[in-house]
Image (spheres, rainbow, N blue to C red):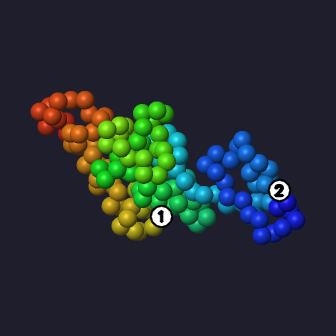
Amino acid sequence: MAKADERIVGVTPAMPSGCSMTIMQRQLPDRVFDVGIAEGHAVRLCYLYTGVADYAYETGDKELYEACKAIYDDIVERKMYVTGGIGSTHFGEEVTVPYDLKNDRAYTETCAAIALIFFAHAMLDFENDAKYADVIEPAVMSLDYYPFSPRRQEPADQLDSCKLFL
């Protein structure tokens, strides 16, 4: 059907395998668009896109940078806590659906915050925009002291001894 009508385009789901989108991607690659959403293991996701952003910067690949920008914007605008934490569920330590940011079950592990800092820094290298630096500060602060985070199991009086050394 898509071959006969050029008005038909494909928009990939988060994981195009398992649907007919992979066939369309092979046959009509110029009419398939990725939605640019972040899903999956929070730490691996940010480290992967840090590498992709670094590669885009080194090679000057603007298209690859735009893909990173879409993923970054999805994380920051729809999947990040105000504390700078990402990864709202312990199940798979994942970045999940937009606005799934429940306080009582926030997983937001420390290594995900560190990975987000690296991703933001890589994006800042490519484009000198304050929106990338604005994410680094709360993510760093969440590493140093955030007594209500589920990832911190220490009693509040012991948190003063937890210092971040960079």
What residue is disc 2 on? 27
Is 151 or 51 nearer to us in this picture? 151
Q: Is residue 74 left or right of residue 149?
A: right
User: Residue 19: image x %, image y %?
Assistant: 73, 45
129 in relation to 76, above or below: below
User: Residue 141: image x %, image y %?
Assistant: 25, 49
Is the C-beta separation of discs 2 and 1 under 8 Å? no
Whole-number angstrom distance, CA of label 2 to CA of label 1: 33 Å
User: Residue 3: image x %, image y %?
Assistant: 86, 62
Is disc 2 surrounded by few (<14), some (14 to 19) or many (20+) residues within 10 Å?
Answer: few
Which is more foreground, mark 2 or mark 1?
2
What residue is disc 1 on? 126
In the displayed orientation, state which residue is furthest to the right: 4
Residue 97 visible (yes or no): yes
Judged from the image, the secondary structure of the residue bearing numbered disc 1 is: helix
42 in relation to 154, above or below: below
Instruction: Kindly identify the residue that appears in the image at 52 percent across and 42 percent down.
Output: 40
Residue 48 visible (yes or no): no
User: Residue 33: image x %, image y %?
Assistant: 67, 61
Q: Is residue 134 left or right of residue 95?
A: left
Total numbered labels? 2
Q: Quadrant of the C terminus?
A: top left
94 in relation to 80, above or below: above
The mark that comes first in sequence, 2 or 1, is: 2
Check disc 1 and give the amino acid type: Phe
Checking the image for residue 160, the label placed there is: none
Q: Is residue 64 left or right of residue 31?
A: left
Is 45 or 74 nearer to us in this picture? 74
Check disc 2 and give the amino acid type: Gln
Is disc 1 surrounded by few (<14), some (14 to 19) or many (20+) residues within 10 Å?
Answer: some
Instruction: Kindly identify the residue that appears in the image at 47 percent across and 64 percent down.
Output: 126
Instruction: Kindly identify the residue that appears in the image at 34 percent across and 61 percent down.
Output: 133
